[in-house]
Image (spheres, rainbow, N blue to C red):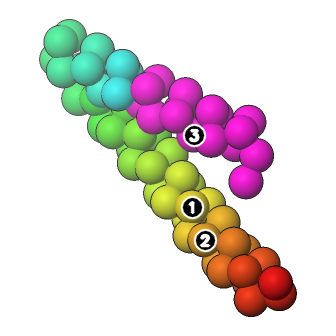
Amino acid sequence: MGLDDKTDNKTEQATGSAKEGFGKLTGDKETEAEGNSQKTQAKAADAAQDAKDSVKGFVQGLKK
């Protein structure tokens, strides 16, 4: 996984959190839900990429 992918996922998580917080602050349930969804999707993408990287590292370790 490239550093860019990690950065993109963290940026999406932060954006989602901000959007969720703004929705809570303003009482806008739609924006709050949208932010929560965005944050959750970014976390899932990050976790999936971490798992993929772990498998890749394991396979490379076997090749040594």
Disc 2 secondary structure class: helix
Residue 13 sits inside the magenta stretch:
yes
Tell me which residue sits at (20%, 10%) in the image: 26
On the image, which quarter does residue 58 sit in?
bottom right
Q: Is residue 40 above or below residue 18?
A: below
- The three-letter amino acid code for the residue at tag 3 is Asn
Provide the residue designation for mark 2.
54
Q: What's the CA distance linking mark 1 and mark 2?
A: 6 Å
- Which label was assigned to residue 9? 3
Report whether 7 appears left or right of 64: left
Q: Give the class, few, some or many, for how many residues have Cα within 10 Å of label 2's Cα (few <14, many ≥20).
A: few
**Mark 1 / mark 3, whichever is N-terminal:** 3
Tell me which residue sits at (41%, 40%) in the image: 39
- The three-letter amino acid code for the residue at tag 2 is Ser
| Bounds of the magenta segment | 1-16
Q: Position of residue 36 (x, y in %)?
A: 33, 39
Report whether 20 appears left or right of 7: left
Q: Is residue 50 above or below residue 59?
A: above
Front tag of 1 and 2: 2
Q: What's the CA distance linking mark 2 and mark 3?
A: 17 Å
Provide the residue designation for mark 1.
50
Front tag of 1 and 3: 1
Front tag of 2 and 3: 2
Residue 50 sits inside the magenta stretch:
no
Q: Nearer the viewer, residue 61 or 25?
A: 61
Tell me which residue sits at (82%, 84%) in the image: 64
Q: Give the class, few, some or many, for how many residues have Cα within 10 Å of label 1's Cα (few <14, many ≥20).
A: some
Tags 1 and 2 in contact by the CB under 8 Å rule?
yes
On the image, which quarter does residue 19 sit in?
top left
